[in-house]
Amino acid sequence: MGAFHHPVRTNLCTAARSIAGIAMAALVGACAVGPVSADAEPAPPTLESDGTTLAGPAIRPSGATDLAGPQRLDALIRVLLAQNPSVAAARARLEAAAERKPQVTALPDPEVEAKWFVRNAMAPRDAGFTRWELMVSQSFPMPQMLALRGDAADAATRMAAFRYEATVRDAIAALEDVHAERRYLAGAEAVQTKLEAVYRRYADVARAGMDSGAARLPESFRAEALAAQSSYDLRLLREMRGVEDAKLRALLGVPGSAPVGPPADAPAVRVLDTSNDQLVARAMEWNQDLRGAGVEVEMAAIDSRMARWNRAPMFMVGVGKMFNDDYDMETGKTTDGATLSFGMTLPIWQHALSAGEREADAKARAAVADEQQMRTMVAADVAMTAFQARATQRLADLYSKTLVPQAELAMSAADARVRKGEESLASSLELAAAWQQMNIARLRAEADHVKAIAALEKLLGTTLTATNAEAPR
């Protein structure tokens, strides 16, 4: 464009585009299990008309606190972005950081000084006037120091922007985690409800068989015990769902008494065909914590240069007026005078200045080391989380495509044979337990896979693959 880019506005615009990318990435992933109407697409956060501060959340869900009906992840993300207290706090901190540069680059306030001469050697004591002076002075730091302060403020604003992005990223990842767990619990409750009905029916069959002599006492007892255990497990699942509902309300910033409906979308099991090297390279580019660590290295280098400029003096220029400055002994008249002053600080305490330089240099080395360590840890965490995503995807496919269908067929066949009296009740009870275990394991693997993908995208700071929402840095 060829135009001057205000650094504060540029940082805020970049943060807005990045948050839009994070939100859109999450929404795209949430919508992978079903279509979403075009009018449901969220608008990215916008800037005020003057471009200096972020406006209130641009994503305004319709009926944000109406959570009683079935809930889809994409709709919950919209509520999260509009109402989550941590996101709002990080947004306010970003806006506060953007206002720092005008403060640190401004000159010190001018000083006004008034002096009264208690004894005037130029006039007799009974002259009837007082000699006094009024002076206005202005201090001037070195221009290089003001420039460095501005650079530090710009870096602090970028740091606040990355922290804002990280807060949104972490909030969405936490929401995906809770939503996946609620989906698992809802599915497990359905499985357990069906299993309890099967056990109850088998217990009735066992009691009838006891009367006719077709069933034995151990079979009847085991059927009754399994039915009771299933009822207890069902109650436990419902209590666990209440815990996850409370977590969801906290994330969405809604009252604890607000009703929360069940999840309405199915888990999306995705094949992770991106190599670890590609994932690590993506994390190195987009991870907000790493980008923030890079800014900390930059800020530490600025502080180190500022420590050396502390040796430079600060200058002061003042102008003043002397009232009743001169006294004519013959006529008794007084005249006023003018003054011009110049001063400077004397940075003479070398031990303190040297200590400040050593301190700044040590902090700069620490920032570089911290960034290097963070990069190695992120790479290791990406490898581990990618392994978990692939392992849970394979496990979910194994259960959903092979083991669960086989268990369904076997249980249906056994149930039919039990009704005809052609199958022992003991083997049917064991088969029902195996069917329940297969289904619970499938649901657990699917939920763990969704959580692993969410954790991986949290490490990357963006989606697994490039999207149109990504903005150049």
Image: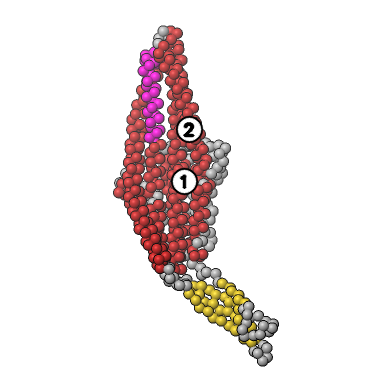
Within-10-Å neighbours for mark 2: few <14, some 14–19, many 20+: some
Count of numbered badges drawn on the protein = 2
Q: Amino acid at mark 1?
A: Ala
Q: Main secondary structure of the magenta part?
A: helix
Q: Which mark is residue 240?
A: 2
Highlighted magenta segment, given as a residue range: 417-446
- Residue 376, given in percent of the width and then of the height, sits at 32, 50
Q: Quadrant of the N terminus?
A: bottom left
Residue 98 visible to the viewer: yes
12 to 130, vertically: above or below: above
Type of the residue with mark 2: Met
Q: Is residue 438 magenta?
A: yes
Figure quadrant of residue 397: top left
Question: Does the magenta segment cover residue 234?
Answer: no
Residue lying at 43% horizontally and 20% vertically, measured from the top left: 226
- Which of marks 1 and 2 precedes in the sequence? 1
Per the image, the residue denoted by label 1 is 171
SS label for mark 1: helix
Q: Quadrant of the C terminus?
A: bottom left
- What SS does tag 2 mark? helix
Display coloring: secondary structure
Q: Residue at x 33, y 36 (%)?
A: 394
